[in-house]
Image (spheres, helix red, strand yellow):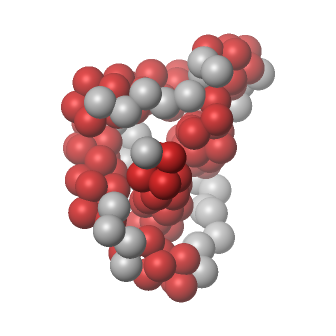
């Protein structure tokens, strides 16, 4: 299923900043054009919502509670980790908003999970 309805809700309800919304659209393009990964509601809905919230937190100055470091270390042990880190680095280099280290960890776990599920499917 497409992410379009989620993007409409995010934009219409003000769940992220305007620059955050633009960054979300860019992230979808990066996954598709740079890594040949189609983001859908099923594989990326939670990640997109988390990133929308992260961009809103940047605007309001709110911090996120850090992830349990064991989760981050677990992703780093997965075979998909190098690609997950490359995707995160690419996204971070091209978006307007600067994510905190804690938000970057969340993104890495989301991307790693997506890649693990993708690998398991096929």
Asked if residue 47 lies left or right of residue 83, the reply is right
Instruction: Report which quarter residue 17 is drawn in.
Output: top right
Residue at 57%, 39% (x, y): give it.
43
Toward the bottom, the furthest residue is: 70
Q: How far across and how far down the image is residue 91, in percent?
A: 31, 42
> Residue at point 60% right, 80% down?
68
Q: Residue at x 37, y 33 (%)?
A: 37
Q: Quadrant of residue 71?
A: bottom right
Label count reads 0
User: Could you tell whether 57 is left or right of 87 in the image?
Assistant: right
Query: Is residue 7 visible in the rendered structure shown here?
Result: no
- Check the picture and name the quadrant holding the N terminus: top right
| Picture coordinates of residue 120, whole percent (x, y) | 49, 54
Residue 22 visible here: yes
Residue extending furthest toward the front: 122
Quarter of the image with the C terminus in it: top left
Give the camera-side residue of 39 and 98. Answer: 39
Q: Foreground residue, 85 or 24?
A: 85
| Up/down of 116 relative to 20, above or below | below
Asked if residue 81 is positioned above or below residue 90 in the image, the reply reads: below
Residue at horizontal 49 percent and vertical 62 percent from the top = 109
* Residue 53 occupies quadrant: top right
Q: Position of residue 45 (x, y in %)?
A: 63, 36
Q: Position of residue 19 (x, y in %)?
A: 46, 26
* Residue 79 located left or right of residue 66: left
């Amino acid at each position: 299923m497409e992410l379009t309805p989620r993007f409409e809700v995010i934009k219409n309800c003000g769940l992220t900043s305007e620059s955050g919304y633009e960054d979300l659209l860019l992230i979808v393009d990066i996954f598709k054009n740079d890594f040949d990964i189609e983001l859908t509601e099923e594989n990326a809905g939670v990640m997109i919502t988390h990133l929308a919230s992260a961009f809103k937190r940047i605007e309001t100055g709110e911090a996120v509670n850090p992830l349990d470091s064991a989760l981050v270390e677990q992703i780093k042990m997965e075979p998909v980790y190098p690609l997950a880190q490359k995707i995160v680095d690419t996204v971070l280099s091209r978006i307007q908003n600067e994510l905190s280290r804690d938000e970057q960890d969340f993104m890495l776990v989301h991307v790693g999970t997506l890649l693990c599920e993708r690998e398991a499917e096929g």
